[in-house]
Image: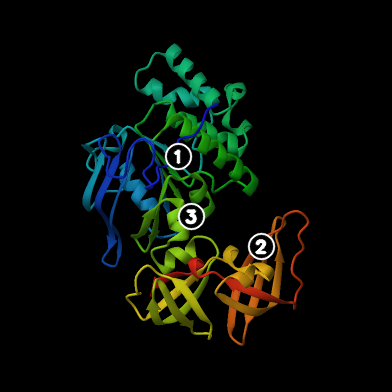
Amino acid sequence: METEPEPRANGTPPGGGPADTETGLAVRGLVRRYARDVTVGPISFTVAEGEFFSLLGPSGCGKTTTLRCIAGFEPVDEGIIELAGRRIEKVPPHKREIGLVFQTPMLFPHLTVSDNVAFGLSVHGVPRREAARRAAVMLALVGLSELGQRRPDQLSGGQQQRAALARSLVLEPPLLLLDEPFSSLDLKLRVQMREELRKLQRRLQKTTIFVTHDQTEALALSHRIAVLSGGRIEQIGTPREIYEQPASRFVADFIGNANLLEAEVLGWRDGIADITTESGLRLQACAAAAPTARRVTALVRPELVRIGNAAASVANTFTAEVTEVVYLGDEAQYRLRLGVRAELLLVRKLTGGSDTLAHASVVNVGIDPGDVVILSR
């Protein structure tokens, strides 16, 4: 049975580590200036051969600008871009041999799907019969074998994006750039396309950079993620590292739901920090070393908040009132009030006929010290 390659224990992606750039991509000190006070960078990262690397962040953070600089559509004011050991920051876009898929498929409306996929091969002088053969192979790979003779306007949005992906991959580029390719699709189709892309990328081992503002897409697809904010990289890591050990308050807040509690460190001993939040909660948090700052932010993920019998076995226990219930089908979200000012968000999976908590009910709440992440402000 075919298995997908997994990242190594230290976060190194299959096919090479972050420093292995002889066959991958290296971006070093990239800067793009638009005005005196509008700058993207300096940005530095490496992408190993076969790695799926995502640039994740809100609108205006610089992720698409970074992608366009790699593709050659934006000039680089400072810095170096190397692809397979070759500097390309001054190479014209059409000579960089990079595959591109944009937010909209941008297929030629007057050509069939098969001819759209074969178009780039024809431009590169590949004989028509061979170009048609390679296009057919690629269409089969993306599940469009039966639709090759249709026009683009006869395809659904997801089928058009698969055709655009086939058109880029048929040229066998060393690097594939994807600029929010699923943003115009509805939610169900986005999830389907995400799974198809994940399987295809793992199968082909194609070095890929994926731009998205959707944290779920980045977590599901990526070997590693770079989180951007204000034209800078906040953190680079595996999906697990980004989610469980965020490097900043911004990353913690942007990735998933988060309880972020402003707090003051009272003391530290034997790997346990005593903190008190601005709302008056006293918490113990696991910390390998004494926190370097007195004022910190404590992060507790909502799905790690314990209730009922499970709350009794941990060090941080409270009594809370359920002030809000949001039913989401397979899970429920609750707003809990602890004392006068303190609030927590709880996310609870609903399995095996488990009931939602009633509004205004009182529950026991527990937070394990190992589930409290201390972030410097």
Question: How many angstroms separate mark 3 from mark 1 (CA)?
Answer: 24 Å
Q: Are marks 1 and 2 in contact (CB under 8 Å)?
A: no
* Percent position of residue 56, x then y: 43, 54
Residue 203 shows in this picture: yes
Callout 2 crowding tier (Cα within 10 Å): few <14, some 14–19, many ≥20 = many
Is 147 on the left-hand or right-hand side of 197?
Answer: right
Question: How many angstroms separate mark 2 from mark 3 (CA)?
Answer: 25 Å
1 or 2: tag closer to the N-terminus:
1
At label 1, the amino acid type is: Glu
* Percent position of residue 237, x then y: 39, 53
Q: Image point 36% across, 81% down: which residue?
A: 294
According to the picture, the residue beneath numbered tag 3 turns out to be 213
**Element on which disc 3 rests:** loop
Q: Is residue 224 above or below residue 193?
A: below
Q: Image point 48% across, 47% down: which residue?
A: 180
Q: Nearer the viewer, residue 167 or 203?
A: 203
Question: How many angstroms separate mark 1 from mark 2 (CA)?
Answer: 29 Å
At label 3, the amino acid type is: His
**Element on which disc 1 rests:** loop
According to the picture, the residue beneath numbered tag 2 turns out to be 348
**Element on which disc 2 rests:** strand
* Percent position of residue 196, x then y: 56, 36
Label ID, residue 6: 1
Is 267 on the left-hand or right-hand side of 151?
Answer: left
Q: Is residue 258 above or below residue 66?
A: below
- Name which quarter of the figure residue 311 lies in: bottom right
